[in-house]
Amino acid sequence: MDTPTTSPTFTLAIADLPLTISADAALIAALVKRYAAFLQPDRPSTFLAQIERAGHTPRATEDRPLVFRLDGAHFTAPDYSGHIDLAQQQATLTLNSATPVEDADYFIRTIYALRLFEAGGLLFHAAGLVHHARGYLFFGHSGSGKTTVSRLSPEALVLNDDLVALMPRDGQWHMHATPFSNPTQHTPAGPGSAIVSGAYRLIQDRRVYVEDLPFAIAVAEIVASSPVVCADPARTLDLLTRARQLHTAVPVRHLHFLPDDSFWNVVE
């Protein structure tokens, strides 16, 4: 790593990918609290993310435009600018924000979306639940019911109800917990993982049933639930291949469900 830092740092790890984060003391303290269960203080990390605050005023817009170039991914807003360079294993962000923890969290999520994809996996917009020792993905757009099915499953271990890390190994896909959540969602308990037994695109309905999907539709649903990388044209073919690999190993279906736990009767 060519970029030294004298600012406070901490290291977290998601899906066995460590990341060291450098920022001012106040922001570090807030992020350490947010990611407490995922901290790896003794874990060596070669990837450094440096965050600098240029001010503390509300940003002019909530948009965080991300542009993909040959040298990496760039945030291009005047009050949210930065660069993620996977080849050099470093990232920088300068922000002017009244909500620096949330804006830093978005930056860190983006780094992990790119690193997971580079490692052969995906950051996936899904609730990851472990029920009776089997792993299940319940996915879909915001409002589709990911948090609902998590709250309706008190016996399940919820790895996360919004974003999980997926990694292939030995012909199977493993889902890993992430610390990425907000106050309206289920707070992840900490690191955990499970082999994915099934993936279900959620559809709120008046009755409960599972619907098989044509291969092309299933692949399209996976692509649509893979944030960050789905916006990069240069990664499109690799993302389609990744989605096909996931669907080949894991059944992908529609789950029509009611706001109760009866969906487990058709899932298991």
Image (cartoon, rainbow, N blue to C red):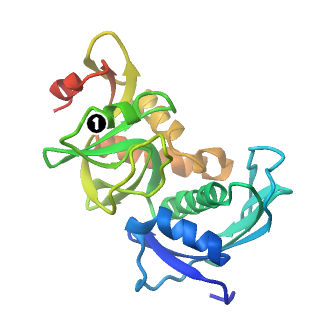
SS of the residue at dot 1? loop
Left or right of 16: which side holds 1?
Answer: right
- Residue 75 locus on image (x, y percent): 75, 58
Is residue 180 something that shows in the picture? yes
In this view of the protein, which residue sits in the foreground, 163 or 229? 163
- The spot of residue 133 in percent (x, y) is 15, 49
Q: Is residue 31 left or right of residue 163?
A: right
Please state which of residues 72 and 163 is positioned toward the viewer in this rendering. 163
The image quadrant that residue 264 belongs to is: top left
In which quadrant of the rendered image does the N terminus lie?
Answer: bottom right
- The amino acid sitting under disc 1 is Pro
Residue at 41% across, 83% down: 43
Residue at the (32%, 42%) spot, across then down: 248
Vertical placement of residue 8 versus 54, above or below? below
Quadrant in the rendering for residue 120? bottom left
Q: Is residue 214 visible?
A: no
- Quadrant location of the C terminus in the rendered image: top left
Taking the view exactly as shown, the residue that stands out farthest to the top is: 206
Q: How many marks?
A: 1
| Quadrant hosting residue 107 | bottom right
Vertical arrangement, residue 45 with respect to residue 197, above or below? below
Q: Residue at x 41, y 31 (%)?
A: 218
Q: Is 108 located above or below residue 201 in the figure?
A: below
Residue at label 1?
251
Crowd rating for badge 1 (residues with CA inside 10 Å; few <14, some 14–19, many 20+): some
